[in-house]
Amino acid sequence: MTEELNRAYELLSDKLIGWFNAIVKNIPNLIIAIIVLVVFYYISKYVSRIIGKLVSKKVHQDSLVNIITKIVAIVIIAAGLFLALGILNLSKTLETLIGAAGVSGLVIGLALQGTLSNTFAGIVLSFRKSIELGHWVETNGFAGEVVEISLKNFVVKEADNKLVMIPNKSILENPVKNYSLTKKMRIIVSCGVGYESDLEKVKQLTKSAIAKQFAEVEKEEDVEFYYQEFGDSSINFITRFWIKGNKAKDKITGQSDAIIAIKKAFDAENINIPFPIRTLQFDNKLSLAKDEKFNEAEA
């Protein structure tokens, strides 16, 4: 038993000494490999910055420039990693890893279908000129400014300053409303006036109020006005006009200013904007004779 323990101790000692000698022998290579990795890391940052500046002169999409610079940085760092492994005499191990990666690539691809689809969708979105950083969009139930298009998520900053990260795949598969593609937007305001109102006067006052409120409306004829229906308590209409704007906030602001202008114009001319009401009318009058007979019967 003692001999077996001594033999095991000797084998363990020889193994540890061998590892220690190998480490000491390869310390210079290890230091050089670490230096190579650090150098290639800084080279990747410097080169990607230069590539980004050069590409931005030809391509005006920030999202596409970001994707290109990230790919360049990854390629440079991967080259540094391969060189470092070669310095450490791990080229055979590297070849084994590459072979294993080819075999396991299919399995990993099946397991990461969602991630890969988002990655390819992010590349496609980066090449789209219709969606760029800074645009105000509405999609998947969210509306806000596009602040980032990465290889995974489409990031939107809402009006309340909250960031919403939407998978790139969902952006490609669902409609996107982009307010920033045009410099003009149409404002639509609905309202109603009392049945006693002079409808021609209401139309003229509304168009005049809108034209005075918004500098973009050059003349009253540019304001569209349509009566829509005889409502329960009012005659309802809509008015439409164009303003300069490319964000959802511009639309809300335009509607608010239009409502204020219309209300002031109607108040000045004593035009009533009724709120929904319900009138209860009792036309049946009970005869006194019936009441007297009923009282006599009770007596």
Image (spheres, grey):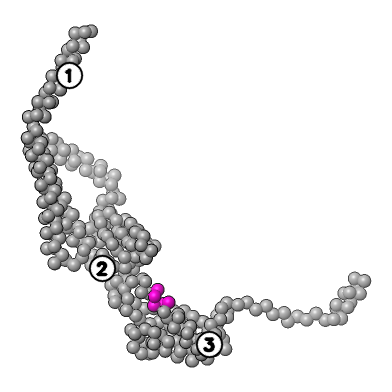
Query: Is tag 2's residue or tag 1's residue first in the polypeptide sequence?
Result: 1
Extent of the magenta region = 252-256
Residue 253's image quarter? bottom left
Query: Is tag 2's residue or tag 3's residue first in the polypeptide sequence?
Result: 2
From where the camera sits, is residue 3 visible?
yes
Q: Amino acid at mark 2?
A: Ser
Question: How far is disc 2 from disc 1 in space, using C-alphas?
Answer: 67 Å
From where the camera sits, is residue 139 visible?
no
Mark 2 or 3: the one toward you: 3
Q: Amino acid at mark 1?
A: Leu
- Find residue 40 and report its horizontal and vertical position in percent: 11, 48
In the figure, is residue 284 to the left or right of 157?
right
Q: Which residue is mark 2?
A: 130
Q: Amino acid at mark 3?
A: Ile
Return the mark for residue 12.
Answer: 1
- Find residue 7 and report its horizontal and vertical position in percent: 17, 12
Question: Overall secondary structure of the magenta stretch?
Answer: helix
Q: Nearer the viewer, residue 71 or 214?
A: 214
Residue 253, magenta (yes or no): yes
